[in-house]
Every structure is written in C-alpha cells, then in structure tokens.
Image (cartoon, coloured by chain):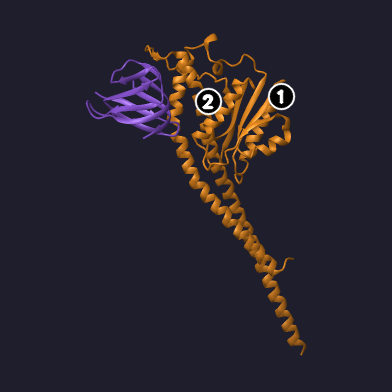
Amino acid sequence: MALHFELVTPARLVRSDDVYMVVVPGTEGEFGVLEGHAPFMSTVRDGALKIYRTEGAAPEEIIVQGGFAEVGANGLTVLAEHVEG
Amino acid sequence: MASLKELKGRINSVKSTQKITKAKQMVAAAKLRKAQAAAEAARPYAQELAKVMASLAGKVSGDSAPKLLAGTGSSQRHLLVVVNTDKGLCGGLNSNIVKAAKIKANELIAAGKDVTFFLVGKKGRGPLRREYDKHIGDGFDTSTVRTPGFAEAEAITAQVIAMFVAGKFDVAHLVYPVFKSALAQDPVVTQLIPVPAPAISTDTGAVVEYEPGEEEILEALLPRYIKTQLFAALLEREASEQGASMTAMDNATRNAGDLIQKLTIQYNRSRQAAITTELIEIIAGAEAL
C-alpha cells in the first residue's frame, strides 16, 4: 500500500520512491495524492512538495519551480524544471 | 637533403604536437563519458513530457489549439536554428552540421521561402555567414559557460519563442548533431515550431481529469517541450563534440607517430651517410701517404 512517486527534472531523475502521500501545490490549490488516486493532470505553481514517507510522519519538503504533475496507473510523476533541496 | 640538425628539430616539433593531440584525446574521452551520462540522465524527463504531450495534443485540436501547436497558418518564413560547437579540433563535425543546414536552406530557398538563421555555437557562424550573409538573424553564444545546461536551453527558447510571438517566422527547424558513436555523429533536421504532434498514442481509456483545463495545460507544456528539445540538442552536441574530437585526435596522434618514424629513419640514414663519408675520407687520406 504505497504510492509510487517520481520527481524528474530535465537534468536527472531526482526521486523515485514508494511513499505514503505527496501533497502537490497545484495552480488551483494544493492537492494530496494517495495510492489509487484517479488519473489526474495538473500544472504546478512554484512551491513546496510535501512528501509523507509514512502515515503521520513529518513531511519532507522539496521546492519545485515550473512544474507539472501527472497521476496515472503507475503513480505520481512530477516534472519540474528546477528543484531545490 | 636536410641537415641532421634540421631533422632533429623537426622530429622534436612533431613529438610535441603528438603530445598535445594525445592529451586532447584523453581529455575528450573523459568528457565524452560525462556528456553521455548527462544525455542519459535527461531522457526520463523528455520521455515523460513526450508522453503527456501525445495524450494532450490528440484531445486539443482545431481552432482552440495554441499557436505553438497549430502554427500561424502560413509557412512562408522559416527559421533554421543551427546548433554548432564552440570549439574546433573535432574533425568534420561542424562542417557536416553546416552542410546539413545548407542543404535544408537551399531546399527552402528553392521553394521560394524566406530563410533566417539562428546560430547557436561559434563554429557555424563563419561558413554560414560567408554564403548567407543576408539571412543571418540572431544567435546565442554558448561559449561563455563551460558546459551548456538547462539554463542555456531556457535562454535560447525564450529568444526563439519571443521571435515567434513577434511574428518573425512561421516555421522553425532545429539542426543539430545526433551522437551515435565516437565515430559517427549525424546531423539531423527536425521541426521545432509548430510542434509536431508526437506520433505515439498512449490512450489508456482512463478518464483523466485536468486542472486547470486541457488547453491551459497544453499551453504551459508547449514551451517546456521546445525547451526540452533544445536541451537535448545541446546535450547531443556536447557528446558529439567530444566523440568527434576523440576520433580526430586519435588519428592525429597516429599520424604524428608515423611521421616521427619516417623522420627518424631519414635522420639515421643521413647520420650513417655522414659517418661513411668521413671514414672514406680518412682511409683515402691514409692510403695517400
């Protein structure tokens, strides 16, 4: 029961992990993605991705810029042009 | 016949040239590995983007499609974005790229189109300016940074898109070398703007929700897609340059080796001839007594 999460920048694959939940700062508001989320596509505003490794754990934050998120059958993929942290 | 001293001088000069070419070859080999790794690391992003583009481009069509996808409706003015290297010592790579660009340009000019060049990298400027002086438009200098990265691709894209928005051209083509191996780097010409719809269809049948909307996402995605293509072109260029340089320098080192061998044989021969002459003179002198 885990969400497959990938964070990709043009230069490299930053993260490819199985996590519990990721909160993505979408252009029209933040949204959390858990395992089994319906197929979804959204642009991402500049902000922090919050990654919850396990339920209730303290989130890990990654600042992304110029991004785009896709939720498909194989999990969540975030494409970002710049990543900090 | 050259004197012994002259020969020695020449051998030494060829030897130092060989040292330089050898060093350049080894540097290129090391850099090639790095460039290849960078090109490989960039692949997942490009693939992912192409996939998303393909699934979106099929859904948004007709009048509502953004200009970057649908074009301006005319194909009169063409822009050729030519990606050359900044440094030489890489064999025929740059002349091959220029040749490919010229073929495309002549083809377009013959069809009665207007052609403008947008030159990236130093080495294409000279030969293209000589023939198409009137057609040279803007350019981008990548020689100021050591390894061009995404920031440079972003800057180039910003310039190109600004030109497109200002209505300076209708169609843009990208000319860049594709790295196949250290021995082969083929220049290719691809269409950059309007973005050709990726052929792969990834319609899984699942209902995908879009936020904000399909068109808005596509509009945000298109410049990014172009950026990625330019970034890939820069990476390919880097790998091609190092590969070509490695091969060219390998040949140069081998040629220098051959030359040294020839000169050494000549040197030894002249030396022996000189000794023989001297001996003959001594013996002749002794016999005369």
Q: Residue furthest left?
A: A56
Q: Please state which amino acid type lies under the numbered disc 1.
A: Ile
Image location (x, y in percent) of residue B47: 45, 26
Q: Residue furthest right?
A: B288
Q: Residue at x 37, y 30 (%)?
A: A63
Q: Residue at x 68, y 76 (%)?
A: B275
Image location (x, y in percent) of residue A50: 31, 27
Camera-side residue: B78 or B11? B78
Image location (x, y in percent) of residue B217: 45, 17
Q: Colour of chain B?
A: orange
Mark number displayed over residue B249? none
Camera-side residue: B50 or B181? B50
Camera-side residue: A52 or B9? A52
Label 2 element class: helix
> Chain ID for label 2?
B
Is B212 displayed left or right of B286 in the figure?
left
Dot 1 corresponds to which residue? Answer: B109
Mark 2 to mark 1 CA distance (whole Å): 25 Å
Image: B242 above or below B192: below
Dot 2 corresponds to which residue? Answer: B226
Q: Colour of chain A?
A: purple
Image: B31 above or below B286: above
